[in-house]
Image: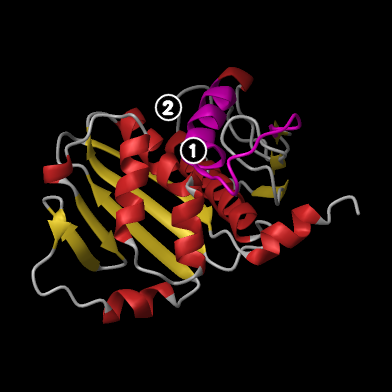
Amino acid sequence: MIGGSTVQLAGIAKGSGMIAPDMATMLAYVFTDASIDPAFLQTLVERATAKSFNAITVDSDTSTSDTLLVFATGQTGNAPIASYDDSGADAFAAALDEVCIELAQLIVRDGEGASKFITITVDGAESDESARRVALSIANSPLVKTAIAGEDANWGRVVMAVGKAGEPADRDRLAIRFGATEVARDGRVVEDYDEAPVAAHLKSGEVEIGVDLGIGEGRATVWSCDLTHGYISINADYRT
């Protein structure tokens, strides 16, 4: 609701393979009947993109048709929104974020050969951007993705992906969890570790990996999918 008027947002997106931040094979279009200043809308779109389409990866590969376009028709007739100080600006920004995040997550769920949707959260990094790079390193690791496909709680592969990100990290402060179960703390397996709840979590279609680097306040969340024989079949047979 903006100034007593009901504003609507609708979106559609295409993407399946060659999906990675900043240059995917992705087309996304969002439409709203709100009246909003183009410059301010651009600010909101950039903010929403950082949280959504630039926080997903299917296979780390990129292409040339990476596009998100947002159209505002002004048909609702509300007083134009031009800054965060205007009535309804926060509500509109939240709605745009929600639409973009849902579309981005749907692209991951529709990833080539995907059988599991993976949420990767990195806390305790030197900065938010550092946390994002670590999270994407985990999300793009073939070893991590195949372990999830095989429902294997191989947390050593997560450690490997943290290390290869090239970001500040300390092995002896590292904590890792699958779902709600912590598997490693201070760089070592937790005492009395029971793999049963982790194995049960990995059998579901929704998998969560949490990493705490323990060195700062940076935080990021990205979404990815597993790497299955289906992905290989689709791309091996792509032209034949």
Is 148 rendered above or below residue 217? below
> Of 55 and 176, which appears nearest the observer?
176
Image quarter for residue 229?
Answer: bottom right
CB under 8 Å between discs 1 and 2: yes
Mark 2: amino acid = Tyr
Between disc 1 and disc 2, the foreground one is: 1
Image quarter for residue 179?
Answer: bottom left
Q: Identify the residue shown where x is 52% and y is 24%.
A: 43
Q: CA distance from mark 1 to mark 2?
A: 9 Å
Mark 1: amino acid = Ala
In this image, 153 relative to 30: left or right?
left
In this image, 57 relative to 169: left or right?
right
Q: Which residue is mark 1?
A: 93
> Of 184 and 6, which appears nearest the observer?
184
> Helix, strand, or loop for circle 2?
loop
Image quarter for residue 35?
Answer: top right
Residue 82 location, x and y as percent? 52, 22
Task: Write the start and end of the magenta stretch as one range.
Answer: 40-68
Q: Identify the residue shown where x is 25% and y is 44%.
A: 123
Is 150 rendered above or below residue 212? below
Sequence-earlier tag: 1 or 2: 2
Residue 135 visible somewhere in the drawing = yes
Q: Identify the residue shown where x is 11% and y is 51%.
A: 186
> Helix, strand, or loop for circle 1?
helix
Residue 220 visible somewhere in the drawing = no
Residue 178 location, x and y as percent? 31, 64
- Label 1 crowd (10 A; few <14 / some 14-19 / many >=20): some
Taking the magenta stretch, the answer to whether it contains residue 64 is yes
- Label 2 crowd (10 A; few <14 / some 14-19 / many >=20): some
Question: Which mark identifies residue 84?
Answer: 2
